[in-house]
Image: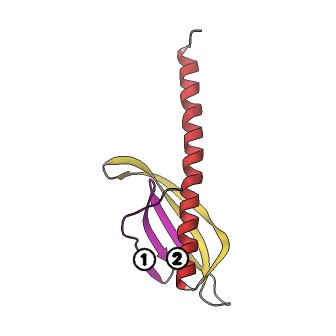
Amino acid sequence: MELSLLNVILIAVFVAVVWYFFDAMRAREIATAVAREYCKQSHIQFLDGTVGLRNVTISMDRGKPSLKRRYEFHYSESDHTRNIGLVIINGNRVEHFILQHQTAVPSDTTLEA
């Protein structure tokens, strides 16, 4: 069976889309776990129990190109507030964890889902 150039390109695009889908799922699981654990340890409420993707950019991580994803979540320090937190993941590494009123940067954390 002979593959034409178009077939090779279509297969490559399909593989890239599948890779992106699974990589995005893994990154979201990491962001959710980080937000949930921080809220639990800080005795604050992790609202909605999930994170939402806000943007994706291409960046460099340790000299290699990677996808930097910014996830947003909501948390509450009391029953009357709703604050925004961010988890920024570069590749498979948590780069920043930011709460609306404070900043916590994990020490070069690498999480595997």
Task: Give the foreground label among 2 and 1.
Answer: 2
Disc nearer the start of the sequence (2/1): 2
Q: Is residue 88 found left or right of 13 in the rendered image? A: left
Magenta residues span 85-111
Q: Are marks 2 and 1 in contact (CB under 8 Å)?
A: yes
**Residue sitting at x 56%, y 13%:** 3
Q: Quadrant of the C terminus?
A: bottom right
Q: Is residue 21 found left or right of 94 in the rendered image? A: right
Number of numbered discs overlaid on the protein picture: 2
Tell me the SS state at disc 2.
Answer: helix
Q: Position of residue 109 (x, y in %)?
A: 41, 64
Q: Is 89 colored magenta in this rendering?
A: yes
Dot label at residue 104 = 1
Dot label at residue 87 = none
Residue at the far left in the pictured view: 63
Dot label at residue 38 = 2
Picture layout, residue 22 above or below residue 77: above
Tell me the SS state at disc 1.
Answer: strand
Q: Nearer the viewer, residue 10 or 50?
A: 50
Q: Position of residue 17 (x, y in %)?
A: 58, 38
Are there few (<14), some (14-19), or many (20+) residues within 10 Å of tag 1?
Answer: few
**Residue sitting at x 57%, y 26%:** 11
**Residue sitting at x 49%, y 56%:** 112
Magenta span dominant secondary structure:
strand
